[in-house]
Image (tube, rainbow, N blue to C red):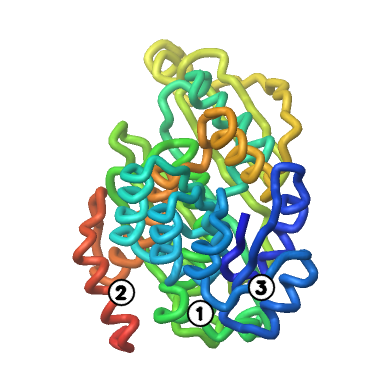
Amino acid sequence: HVIVGVGATVLNMHRPALALDTVDLVGAMDIRHDAGRERADSLGCPYFTDYKEMIAETKPDVVVVMTPHTSHAEIAIHGLEAGCHVLVEKPIAVQVKEADAMVAAMRRTGRCLAVNFQQRFRPEIVAAHQLIQSGALGKIQHIDMVLSWLRTAAYFRMGGWRASWAGEGGGVLINQSIHDLDILCHLLGAPAALTGWTRTIQQAIETEDTVQAMFRWANGAMGSLFVSTAVGSRPYRLEIVGSQGMLQIGQGTIQYEAYEQDVREFIDTSPEPFGVLPGVPQEIALGDSTGAHVDVYKNLHAAILDGAPLLVAADTAVAALELANGITLASAQGGEVSLPLDRDAYAALLARYTAGGKS
């Protein structure tokens, strides 16, 4: 393995995974040379000043990309075309047009391109995915997601690229809430359309710190998302309601209630004008995954060495970015946006925002 962007704060979250027996770290690179050398020394590997030279010299099996989002596409595509597998930090890129090119490179080269969406491995998310796929909830009707990723001014001072259009390509949507958008798509598939409102209500930043979005799925299901880095901490809540049951998911918790009959049948047959549909709490067995970076590494290594399914493959990670881009576009246009997203329309909007044209 080699690391591009070893000076990143997120390195500390990767350290347990880098200690796996399947990892032999042979190089690290960062554009901030003092910090990069210090980190490389702490990891016991050679330091490089140029990622292309590092890849050419070390010929690694895996390139781990920890740089700011705006450089993900360029570095990942270079790594794939050099014959390497690639693990890129979230988000996959800053706009879907770049992500499309990354997926095309993955397919063209036959290499693995994984995105670090470790929250898919949270035990409660694994259990929810299995339940939904089994059909236990019946027809999905409504989804509600509310959460806070509170951040202080000190957080944004950690890197000048943070929460800027040129440096990050967005705010809470593309950084913190990209995990939540990924969970939404991972569990339920991508919506058919959305609308949304992005605001900067507290933070002294140029991108959004607060978002309200509404989603519409092809099967008729509707959903909502509220997320912010500027409101007091609120409990993580994801509620999924189906015609045969409902899930309530928190951070590390899941509650499943099965209805005694399908809600459509209950509506048609109950003699009570104000009937209440009884639900029965169900026990859910949780697995031993942790939802940490190490789960992503283990899965990637199993895919490379044993041909196991890659559970965080790039082509499954584009949907979350498409929602983030779509909400931003919907807020700018003041209306509903259909998916798949108009790539050119979003690219033009991002170029305008990056040039300082956001009103």
**Residue in the foreground of this view, choosing between 258 and 102:** 102
**Label 3 sits on what residue type?**
Tyr
Cα distance in 3D space between marks 3 and 1: 42 Å
Above or below, 346 against 85 in this view is below
Identify the secondary structure beneath mark 3: strand
Above or below, 270 against 124 in this view is above
Residue at the spot of label 2: 350
**Label 2 sits on what residue type?**
Leu
User: Are discs 3 and 1 less than 8 Å apart at CB?
Assistant: no
Eye-nearest disc, 3 or 1: 3
**Residue in the foreground of this view, choosing between 91 and 267:** 91
Residue drawn where x is 43% and y is 47% of the image: 314
**Label 1 sits on what residue type?**
Ile
- Residue 121 horizontal side relative to residue 356, left or right: right
Residue at the spot of label 3: 47
Of pointers 3 and 1, the one earlier in the residue sequence: 3
Cα distance in 3D space between marks 2 and 3: 34 Å
Above or below, 73 against 273 in this view is below
Above or below, 103 against 352 in this view is above
Identify the secondary structure beneath mark 1: loop
**Residue in the foreground of this view, choosing between 298 and 51:** 51
Q: Position of residue 291 (x, y in %)?
A: 68, 44
Identify the secondary structure beneath mark 2: helix
Residue drawn where x is 41% and y is 70% of the image: 198
How busy is the neighbourhood of tag 3: few (under 14 within 10 Å), some, or many (20 plus)? Answer: many
**Residue in the foreground of this view, choosing between 271 and 36:** 36
Corner quadrant of residue 267: top left
Eye-nearest disc, 1 or 2: 2
Residue drawn where x is 48% and y is 39% of the image: 186
Q: Position of residue 251 (x, y in %)?
A: 70, 47
